[in-house]
Image: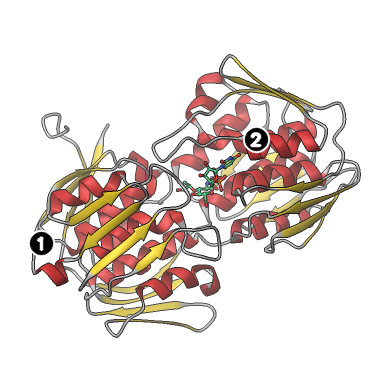
Amino acid sequence: MEEMLVIRGGAPLRGEVTVHGAKNAVLPLLLAGTLTDEEVEICDCPFISDVEAMTLLMRSLGVDVAREGRRIRVRGGAKRASADGALSKTMRSSMFMLGALLATVREVHMPLPGGCNIGARPLDIHIDGLRAMGARVEARDDMLHCCADELHGADIVMRYPSVGATENLMMCASLARGDTCLINCAREPEIVCLARGLKAMGGDISGEGTSVMRIRGVRKLRGASLMPCGDRIVAGTLVAATAVAGGDVAIYGVDPCDIASVTDAFKSDHCLIDDDGVCVRVRADGRIRPVNISTAPFPLFPTDMQAQLMGAMCFADGVSVIDETVFERRFAHARELVKLGADITLDAGRAIVRGSGLTGGRLKGATMYARDLRGGAGLVIAALGAEGESKIFDIGYIDRGYERPEDMLSCLGADISRLPVAGVEAR
Ligand code: EPZ
């Protein structure tokens, strides 16, 4: 049954919220669990569709994986080299299987995941690194065929600090023969979280969180109980929502350092943000300072917060310039925001947003369609600040990465509900 979010703007947000485990930490940790025959438990796994889809994908590989409340238990590795074709084609995250499957089954056959709504999503950095470690990789008939009799350590210079490629190479290197050095690797908190998990399993890793990571292969990894880091993008989304709606919100469950680039972007005389190392507190009156921001790898402003930033800058007291440098097609939310009356001009990878605080215009509720996960979050943020009622369709995208967003926001005082779509309303 299709559902929509109905939001009436204008209500300030007040209260406390704890963000769930990070989607982008749980997904690699689940695959790390297949690197040993012993039981691995991943705690605080959010009830979001990307996690459910990953467990289905793993099960189609013959992995014994089961959810028990907020914990997911993985018992043993993959038994097959290829997942359910249709499933892995729909699942972007299937490319994260590459490393784990090569390290254990020594073979992977998967449909090339192809592009998605935000960009082409090539795999060259993954493939170059796996080849350097001794894998044979061939792309043929829309399929990726990989195999490796043995994996050995290598010094790998990554042309771009790809998050997924770093994670694949970490998992491969952990069970390879010899030492691997990843140069120009990703530094995201989710990378540090994966390294911590692999070390809890007996892995030998150092340098995580920096641009040079060293991994010494071990003969086998052991079972462990793994705790993902809090979801910094959900936390950042709450910062943006409070900045737009106004109010006083305390956000728990994430390291304030992990969202420093986001809180810096929203801080102003009208949006006071401070932390005590555990809780990030946002006190705002609803006025927004314009920004000039380029998305970039961690620790700079995350691409996964670009849509939420744009949703907020629609209300700013001036002109904002937002450059999306990570993905080539990540502005689909702009044309939806314009339906509220936002003034946004796109020029290649740049968005120029003339905020309503400058133009005197008023953003009014509208019917909008989510086009991707974070784009949908951006629409929710703008609807919180717009006058009147907004409806957001295709919220399945949002459910990929946010656990019951309507509950999270309504608990803070937002006027938001999830309703079934009557047949005539859609489209
Ligand atoms: C991860 O995707 C995240 N997904 C993304 O979050 C996030 O936006 C992205 O990292 C950047 O932070 C998960 O962790 C599941 P990349 P990933 O490889 O690993 C290019 C969300 O909303 N590239 O760091 O796929 C690529 O095209 C999602 O939670 C190559 O050219 O991102 C992109 O332009 C969306 N060749 C850039 O690098 C490669 O071999 C960054 O991609 C690999 C990547």
Closer to the camera, 44 or 115?
Answer: 115
Q: Is mark 2 on a helix, strand or loop?
A: helix
Q: Label 2: few (<14), some or many (≥20) within 10 Å?
A: many
* Quadrant hosting residue 416: bottom left
Residue 387: numbered disc: 1
Where residue 267 appears, as percent x and y from the top left, is: 36, 78
Q: Is mark 1 on a helix, strand or loop?
A: loop
Measured Cα–Cα span from mark 1 to mark 2: 45 Å
Q: Residue placed at 60% from the left, 56% from the top?
A: 190
Residue 416: numbered disc: none
**296 w.r.t. 15: above or below:** above
**356 w.r.t. 247: above or below:** above
Q: Quadrant of the C terminus?
A: top left
Residue 97: numbered disc: 2
Q: Quadrant of the N terminus?
A: top left
Where residue 68 appears, as percent x and y from the top left, is: 57, 45
